[in-house]
Every structure is written in C-alpha cells, then in structure tokens.
Amino acid sequence: MKDAFYALITIFLLMIPGFIFGKKNIITEEQSKGMSKFLMSVVLPLLIINSMQIDFEKRYMTAIIKILFSTFSVFCLTCVLAYCLRKILKMEKNYTCLIAFCLFFANTGGIGLPIINTIFGKEAVFYAGLVEVAVDILIFTVGIVFIQLSGENGRDGIRIEPKKILSPGFIGIVIGLALFFCNIKLPFIITNTFDKIGGASLPIAMFIIGYSLGKIKMNTLFADVRIYIITVAKMAVVPILTYIICVFIFRMSYEMSGVMTILMAMPTGSAAVIFSQEYNADYMFASKCVVLTTAASLITLIPLTMLIMSNV
C-alpha cells in the first residue's frame, strides 16, 4: 500500500512542470495539443498492444464479458443520476444528457491508462483496455446523440458518425485483442520498443493535465454552485456505484473492480468540451466540469487508490 501511495504522489508531482509551463506561457496551446495527439495516436495504442501480449486463458473470456456488461450498467446508472441531479438543480431538460455525458465519459485513456499501468501493472492495462473499448463505442454513438440533444434541443437533427469510433486507441485495442485471441507473440525487439514508448505515457499525460490546470482562471469556477454538486457526483458517487456494481453484482475480482472504479473516478474528459462546441451545447458548462473534476482528482484519487490497493 505504501508503494501505491508513493506512486500516486509521483504521478501528481509530474504535473508540476506542465503547470509551470502553462502559467508562464512557455509553450503554446498548439504545442500542447500536439503532445496530446502524440499521446493518443501513438503512445497509448502501443501501450495497449503491449499489455495484451499475454498468454490466452479461458478466465479472460469471463473477465471480458463482466467488464463490458459492468461498463454498460454504470453508464445506465449515471444517466439516472444525471436526471435526478438536473431535477434537483432545477436546470432545463436538455441538460440531462450533458450532465450524463460529463458524469460517465471520463479521461480514461489520457490519464486513466497510464495511472493503471503505474499502480497495477501490465495485466491491469489489459482490463483497462477492455473498458476503453466499451467507452469508445458508447461515446461515438450514444455520447454524440446525448450532446446533440443537449445543443439547442437537438433541432439540428441526430447524426452518428461510426467512422469516428476508429480512433488510434480503438484500433490499438482491436490489434491487441486479435493478437491475444490468436495467441500470437510479437518479437522481443518489437515489444521492447513498445514498452519504452508506452513508458512515456504517464509523464506526457500528467504534463498535459498540469498545463491545462496552469491555464485556468480559478475565479471563473467559484460562481457556479451547480458545478460543485456535479463534481461531487462525478468524483465520489459514480466511483462508489461502480465499485458496488463490480463487486456485488458481477462478482469481479478486487483487481478488476479496482481498475473499473479508478477509471470511473477519472475527471471528465475533454471530449465533453469538444463535442459541446461542435454540436452547439453549453460548452462553458462542460469546460467547468472538466476543470473542477480535474482539480478534484488531486484530492480524491490518492485515498481511493489506497483503499482499493489495501484489498487487492
């Protein structure tokens, strides 16, 4: 458990250079986006493929089924939670879908996978990759529909773009699973190269998050009380619901449950802002959710991971 604590402290210390670069404007927004694109298009896909270079065993089939069904179950519960929050906060009806998007679609790839790799190890990244499959399918189908319904009451019509599911991360997962099910092992020189590149995932991810926090004008967050309530739901209620579903309904192992819970405890992903801008939803509201949940993760992730690691 002490090792997990030190690992998490190290993770958050890695944000300091990015925070300084953001505050001092040492790099531009375009350069930061370039780093993010390199992370998502190259580093994470190779990390995922390398994590799936393990011997095929029947127990993994059960794990795949449980993870996929539990992910979809968590999504359904977050939709119910979003509806309740919207009613309590007395917001307009079209905010139900936007809140649901912010509650469920966390930064599972950019931050989640590197953290899982650092704390739990290679096999856990395999499980995390399966969660990412389910999340990718949902975000580019139901997720887009939700954001479209949030934007001007969906008057522009619903447009699903299946080709967007084929992101580099998703392709990496498909390749990794194909190699896994066929029990094909890549040459050592390839896996070693993938391992070295994948090892850069955490420093790059935390630098980008630190940079984003450094660019934030914190006084813009304090006026909207609704964001605080949604942040508590995202960073506390959703992980608790996830853990209950994994342990008591699907009877998953502590490691699998821990991976699922930590991924769902990640801050709201930047896709909430990007999609909101594209489909004319309230992107400022989404931006506040991303910023405040990212800041809150500095407080919530350490005790959550310590609690889970004590049972693994």
Image (cartoon, helix red, strand yellow):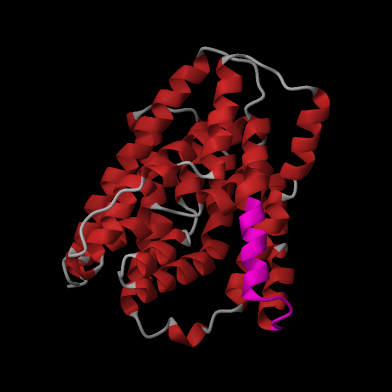
* Of the pair 28 and 240, the residue shown nearer to us: 28
Task: Say if the magenta span includes residue 38.
Answer: yes
Magenta portion: prevailing SS class? helix
Q: Is residue 208 visible?
A: yes
Q: Is residue 268 visible?
A: no
Up the image or down, 177 lies above or below 154; here it is above
Residue at x 37%, y 47% (from the top left corner) = 140
* Of the pair 179 and 64, the residue shown nearer to us: 179
* Of the pair 216 and 30, the residue shown nearer to us: 30
Residue at x 38%, y 62% (from the top left corner) = 275
Q: Please tell me in which quadrant of the rendered image residue 235 appears.
A: bottom left
Residue at x 68%, y 46% (from the top left corner) = 43
Q: Is residue 218 left or right of residue 149?
A: right
Q: Position of residue 111 (x, y in %)?
A: 58, 53
Task: Say if the magenta span includes residue 211.
Answer: no
Q: Please tell me in which quadrant of the rendered image residue 32 appears.
A: bottom right
Q: Is residue 243 left or right of residue 125?
A: left
* Of the pair 13 and 299, the residue shown nearer to us: 13
Tell me the quarter of the image containing the N terminus: top right
Tell me the quarter of the image containing the C terminus: top right
Up the image or down, 134 lies above or below 30; here it is above
Q: Please tell me in which quadrant of the rendered image residue 163 appears.
A: top left
Up the image or down, 6 lies above or below 273; here it is above
Q: Which residues are magenta?
A: 24-39
Q: Position of residue 230 (x, y in %)?
A: 34, 66
Q: Position of residue 255 (x, y in %)?
A: 54, 33
Q: Is residue 131 left or right of residue 123?
A: left
